[in-house]
Amino acid sequence: MKSRRVGITTTVPVEVIYAAGCIPVDLNNIFITGPNPGELVEEAELAGYPRNVCAWIKGIYSTVLRQGDIRTLVAVTQGDCSNTHALMETLELAGVEVIPFAYPFDRDRDLLTLQIEKLMDRFGVDWAAVNRARERLDRIRRKVWEIDRLTWQENLVGGWDNHLYQVNCSDFKGDPDAFEREVDEFLHRLKEAGPRREEIRLAYIGVPPIMDDLYDYLEERGARVVYNETQRQFTLPFATEDLVERYRLYSYPYGIFYRLEDITREVKKRNVQGVIHYAQSFCFRQIEDLIVRQKLNLPILTLEGDKPNRLDARTRMRLDSFIEMLR
Ligand code: SF4
């Protein structure tokens, strides 16, 4: 029997979904890597989504409708985005079963345990099965952590590959075995690679970019991203085997001050010279830029992206000036 595909709107405890024999599908990833993501945004606008709503939400909406076989969605109702609420409702209207999942704002362990156990009930799995799934996925995560280490410590990996392998740890591309093979092949190829020569080391913080040429553009100009904040968090880069603790340490859903602890630690460790703070148009996280600017003691360039596209001329010019200033 074909496994049920379950949509997710951001990183959730995928161990539960895999333990149930279902296939998690990170809707962000299939939206943005599809043949024409811009068309999906337009489709949502034609359906009635306002122009001034984040393109990720619109892209996810159309992706679910287009895919057709995603009839269940785990939606994060706290810790991601308030727009998700309306997204859930519009998809419910289209007949999709929506399972809510909430990260407690204060990282309360009891509440998080309750949320994970409620999710387990919905999928009919127990802790033994979930922990088996965790062990399987952790083997892959450890290899992706190595890709990240080879990025900042050995200078063997470019910003895009660092982004890509880490961002795919939200759902392991729905096929952990195939994804692990991809990771293995990439690590194998790195054995032949010489160290990269970009002289400027950057951090990228904020949600993953909606434009796909940012990393290449920076590297053409001698600057390389050696730390992708959110993407790295998707790999749950924590040594503990306690699943609840893992999702408690995971910083993305828990507010800017907790995220800043991770950011401050990593930019120092990775010897970063400048920070790109990416903010999506119409995203509430744009407001947090003012906190980032007060708290981070490094040059910061705030970039805004709207629709899926390549970098526009103005953004290129701002990146050029930032790199020149750092140089
Ligand atoms: S970029 Fe911001 S507004 Fe858009 S889905 Fe993510 S959190 Fe929500």
Image (cartoon, helix red, strand yellow):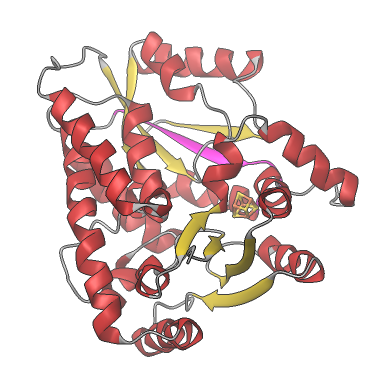
Q: Is residue 310 left or right of residue 41?
A: left
Residue for point 56% across, 32% down = 303
The residue lying toward the viewer, choosing from 248 and 71, is 71
Query: Residue 268's spot in the image, x, y percent?
Result: 22, 41
x%, y% of residue 310? 60, 21
- With respect to residue 270, does 71 lie above or below? below
Residue 172 location in percent, x, y?
37, 51
Q: Nearer the viewer, residue 285 or 177?
A: 177
Residue under the image location 50 percent in, 21 percent down: 213
* Highlighted range, magenta: 273-283
* Residue 109 drawn at (x, y percent): 34, 84
Q: Is residue 282 magenta?
A: yes
* Residue at x 48%, y 38% (from the top left corner): 277
Left or right of 310, for residue 270: left
For residue 263, above or below residue 238: above
Q: Is residue 78 above or below residue 228?
A: below
Q: Camera-side residue: 94 or 321? A: 94
- Residue in the foreground of this view, choosing between 265 and 128: 128
Q: Is residue 104 above or below residue 275?
A: below
**Number of disc labels:** 0
Q: Which image quadrant for residue 224?
A: top left
Q: Quadrant of residue 304?
A: top right
Left or right: 195 in relation to 112: left
Q: Is residue 306 visible?
A: no
The residue at the far front in this view is: 1
Most common secondary structure along the magenta stretch: strand
Report if residue 318 lies within the magenta region. Answer: no
Q: Is residue 86 visible?
A: yes
Query: Where, quadrant-wise, is the C terminus in this rendering?
Result: top left
